[in-house]
Amino acid sequence: MKFKVSTKEKFTTITVNEANIYAKLTDNLSEICLPYLTQNVKNIILQIKDVETVDEDAANAIAKLQQTFYEANASFVICEIQPNVEDTFDELELLEFLNVTPTESEAWDVVQMEEIERELLDDSDVEFDVE
């Protein structure tokens, strides 16, 4: 799979430079993304503006990958999705579960908001001694 990786302070953007994503390619995507869960910058933005089609197995694999990130308290946001790809996710009833934004800038905002939310939730676990 052809891709470009760009790491920022709170997230890494992975830009897929393929017109079609098939299940075989999602194995490569997982190999690229999953190691980030063990790093300081865990959040992923998947930029897929060049992707024109995605098959059913690949769509399911991407949804599963996103779920893996959220279970690990990390963000996984998909941005700049093309109409054909969006239709595939919608037909498979996955779109409503995916975190999708129209632009990469909006994806950055989502990651930053989710980071703040996680920090606040962690802070709410603090117990106070009341005497």
Image: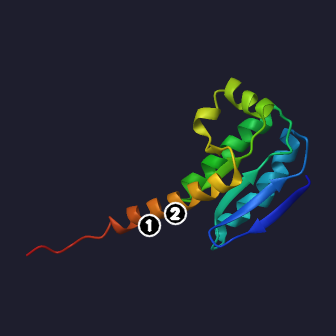
Three-letter code, disc 1: Glu
Front residue of 52/121: it is 52
Drawn side of residue 106 relative to residue 23, left or right: left
Where residue 52 sits: x, y (%)? 86, 36
At x 70%, y 54%, the residue is 104
Please tell me how crowded label 2 is: few (under 14), some (14-19), or many (20+) other residues with Cα within 10 Å: some
Question: What label sits on residue 22 in the rendered view?
Answer: none
Mark 2: amino acid:
Glu
Q: Is residue 128 above or below residue 98?
A: below
Q: For this rendering, which residue is in front, 37 or 113? A: 113
Cβ atoms at labels 2 and 1 below 8 Å apart: yes
* Snapshot quadrant of residue 127: bottom left
Reading the image, the residue beneath label 1 is 119
Number of numbered discs: 2
Q: Residue at image x 61%, y 47%?
A: 67
Residue 56 shows in the view: no
Please tell me in which quadrant of the rendered image residue 130 appears. bottom left
Disc 2: which residue: 115
Q: Residue furthest top?
A: 91
Whole-percent x and y of residue 63?
Answer: 67, 41
Q: Quadrant of residue 88?
A: top right
One can see residue 102 in this view: yes
Rounded to the nearest whole Å, what is the CA distance between mark 2 and mark 1? Answer: 6 Å
Q: With 60 as the anchor, is 55 left or right in this view?
A: right
